[in-house]
Image: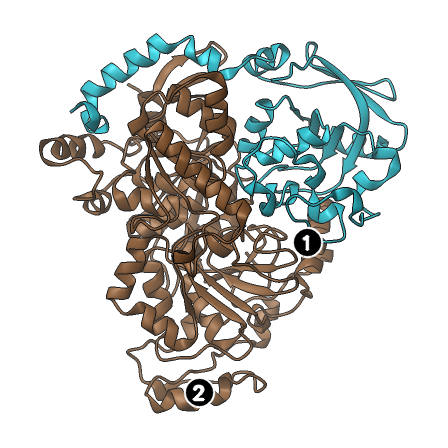
Chain colours: A cyan, B brown
Amino acid sequence: MKAFRRFASRVAPLDRANIDTDAIIPKQFLKSIRRSGFGPYLFDEWRYLDRGEPDMDCSYRPLNPDFVLNQPCYFRARILLTRENFGCGSSREHAPWALADYGFRVIIAPSFADIFYNNCFKNGILPIVLDAEIVDRLFEQAGPGVDLTVDLETQTIATHYGDKIHFEIDPSRKYRLLNGLDDIGLTLQHADKIRAYEASRRQTAPWLFPEYA
Amino acid sequence: MAAKTLYDKLWDDHVVYSEPDGSTLIYIDRHLIHEVTSPQAFEGLRLAGRKPWRVTANLATADHNVPTAEREHGLSDPISRLQVETLDRNCADFGITEFGMNDDRQGIVHVIGPEQGATLPGTTIVCGDSHTSTHGAFGALAFGIGTSEVEHVLATQCLVQKKAKNMLVKVEGQLGQGVTAKDIVLAVIGRIGTAGGTGYTIEFAGSAIRSLSMEGRMTVCNMAIEAGARAGLVAVDEVTIAYLKDRPYAPKGNLWDKAVAAWRQLRSDEGAVFDKVVEIDAAAINPQVTWGTSPELVLPIDTAIPNPERETDPVKRESMKRALQYMDLKPGTAITDIRVDKIFIGSCTNARIEDLRAAAEVVRGHKLASNIKQALVVPGSGLVKRQAEQEGLDRIFREAGFEWRDPGCSMCLAMNADRLEPGERCASTSNRNFEGRQGYGGRTHLVSPAMAAAAGIYGHFVDIRQLPSPASEPKKAPAKKAPAKTAAASRTKSAAAVKTSKPAPTTRNQSARKRKSEQ
């Protein structure tokens, strides 16, 4: 996984609440057995005027000019600003894969759906929860030429207007993201503890281990 | 010792190791696998040279992509076929038990787990699917995970988690006639919102929950995720134990007795503290219908579409306006005036035998209204399908004009050929009404199986409480005619001839408009 330390970019304001994972990446693209290549289909139903299908060449598709990511000033935005309960719905990791493949590294919202929030960290995306009032202010400020700088080490966002905004994050998630660590590798360092747990569970709940019965 | 909630007990029982900041390695007893969220996980295992930690803890089936008709010809969509074949190959390579597409036991992963007794009380159950919350109905801690976590569970039999908070949703009292588990959970979501349960595990309790069958409890827990909670729970009782006895994967003999003794402890202790409590009066719940593009945009059947201008929160107001535009609905329209094009009876929410029985009860002796373009019944598993056929339910549906299909996720998320076309409106027993969920441009209204069936017969939503029960006298029927433009009215006559008149329900009264958005 890509490590995340400090990141500066244009911020794209996507002003909707409850954006679900079906909207982030529609179901027809979930048929892929790969982990990459979802970026062109990110927000497919909002971004394009036609109906998207897997393996389409998106460079020929008609763009929806009203959709924020299609506005030239946000072409290179890699920070997404949005509203509450972002990523609700399905557990599909294709949603953060599509966001990451498009190039987003940071998503700022007043709240996230739990599974989506968790999935972001597995893909080098930093989801940042801020108070609704601060998010309102960032929406007011967002526009052409407005960048944000996010520093994970110090847990701060520096705005274009000179503000410093602090954000919270779990120490263990921060550590893993800062160092781009492989979760499975870390867990396997505790293999002895897992085996010990299984041994005791076989005593207390033997019906869960029919293979050893 | 401090009183514990059911969630506290399940959590404590599965802790392998805790970090000082609360990040905890928890052990996973059962991992369910399907074709959509697993290929990249197996690929990850292979690339890292890893093997599944405990092969027998896994159970797989293909459900999201599979066709529900003409299955003997296999999958015609090459991309779907590759995904299903990839699951077959991965399971074969790693020695994981899989119910293949033509196995009788194949079905929606959340239907087959309980049906096989693979879902057991006191266990942790995960799957790369958010509706894994379904299994919480058995007093199991069950939740959806992403593909990276699927790989993590395969490789380590554990997950790194932080403990959620405890929420109690207490539904006390007796449900009205025609009001189902689906209506309970839609009413809960209407009350607390789609983010109301975020960060919580919800325990559903109270006399109305205890009086539900296991199937009803599964419907309720299934949609906990639609309230934002990764996991829903119902305490174990005799209903749970009776359901599991003699299921293929359930323990037998001496082990069964030991297991049952342990399972009986799986309830929240007297005096256990919840971070949040929501109380709901079961008797006040009416049949529910969603009208927007989020499950929280839901109303009782006897109300009308709300006016966004009366919403004071600007973000909510915008969401409502956008939903009305997408759904092509106007404020003030009575729910019972909404006409539908398609009917979908199926999904992990409502495709078990009791759901099919409830729908068939409404359909029996009637025909689909002429404006219904398609009505699908998709059983949750091959075994549900077989049971329904033994009871003659397939005949009831077919005679009414419904299509009787093979098991799978089908039009719940439209990954296979079953879908809405742009602008089509569907009465659906599934769980999500998001934009495009059932097909590009499709419009979804979530309802119970009986309500979906009735919408098929009348061509628009009706209050099933106003339909005469099969036992009552058919002549006492309608106070008002069905819309004259539909063939429904004329068919009423022929239906009446076989002593099962098709009454037009008394709806659309003036007061419905006044009562709108009271909940």
Q: In this view, does B71 lie above or below B479?
A: above
Q: Name the residue under label 2.
A: B492
Identify which residue, B489 or B516, lies in the foreground.
Answer: B489
Q: Is residue A10 left or right of residue B162?
A: right
Residue B494 placed where, x, y %? Answer: 40, 90
Does residue A39 appear in this view?
yes
- Location of the N terminus of chain B by quadrant is top left
* Residue at image location 46% in from the left, 22% down from the top: B46
Residue B184 placed where, x, y %? Answer: 42, 53
Secondary structure of the residue carrying tag 1 is helix
Secondary structure of the residue carrying tag 2 is helix
Amino acid of disc 1: Met
Identify which residue, B384 or B165, lies in the foreground.
Answer: B384
Residue A200 placed where, x, y %? Answer: 23, 15
Q: Which of marks 1 and 2 is in front?
A: 2
Q: In this view, does A94 lie above or below A126?
A: below
* Residue at image location 71% in from the left, 59% down from the top: B325
Q: Mark 1 points at which residue?
A: B320
Does residue A89 appear in this view?
no
- Counting other residues with Cα less than 10 Å from the Cα at mark 1, is it few (<14), some (14-19), or many (20 or more)? many
